[in-house]
Image (cartoon, rainbow, N blue to C red):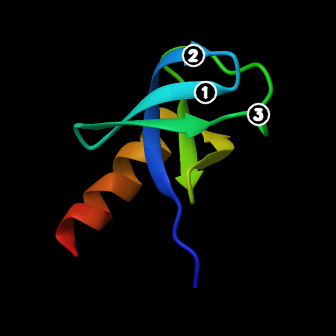
Amino acid sequence: MCLAIPAKVISIEKNLAKVDIAGVLRKVDVRLLEDLKIGDYILVHAGFGIEKINKREAKETLKILEGI
């Protein structure tokens, strides 16, 4: 089973983005994503941004993960 975690994009520099994952800041590779903007929500897996998602979906998923 694979798990991707929702994250909010804080800054972008070339192929790396600083993201906020439930209050923890990380740098992830975002070269797989097109048209990425600051404030977008993405799914992060193994250090890579793999998909853009909407804010509602991100918040719901984080709430579920916090309950585990």
Q: Which residue is mark 1?
A: 16
Q: Residue drawn 60% across and 14% down?
A: 13
**Residue 4 percent location from the top left of the image:** 53, 61
Q: Which residue is mark 3?
A: 31
Label 2 environment density (alpha carbons within 10 Å; few <14, some 14–19, many ≥20): some
Name the side, left or right, on which 46 lies relative to 62: right
* Location of the N terminus (image quadrant): bottom right
**Residue 56 percent location from the top left of the image:** 44, 40
Do the residues under discs 2 and 1 have CB atoms within 8 angstroms? yes
Q: Residue drawn 61% across and 27% down?
A: 16
Name the side, left or right, on which 25 lies relative to 39: left
Q: Amino acid at mark 1?
A: Leu
**Residue 27 percent location from the top left of the image:** 47, 34
Task: Determine the secondary structure under disc 2.
Answer: strand
Q: Nearer the viewer, residue 13 or 36?
A: 13
Q: Mark 1 or mark 3: which comes first in sequence?
A: 1
Mark 2 to mark 1 CA distance (whole Å): 6 Å
Label 1 environment density (alpha carbons within 10 Å; few <14, some 14–19, many ≥20): some
Q: Residue drawn 22% across and 76% down?
A: 68
Where is residue 24, by image quadrant?
top left
Q: Amino acid at mark 3?
A: Arg
Label 3 environment density (alpha carbons within 10 Å; few <14, some 14–19, many ≥20): some
Name the side, left or right, on which 19 lies relative to 37: left
Task: Determine the secondary structure under disc 3.
Answer: loop
Task: Determine the secondary structure under disc 1.
Answer: strand
Do the residues under discs 1 and 3 have CB atoms within 8 angstroms? no
Where is residue 12, by image quadrant?
top right
Mark 1 to mark 3 CA distance (whole Å): 8 Å
Q: Which residue is mark 2?
A: 12
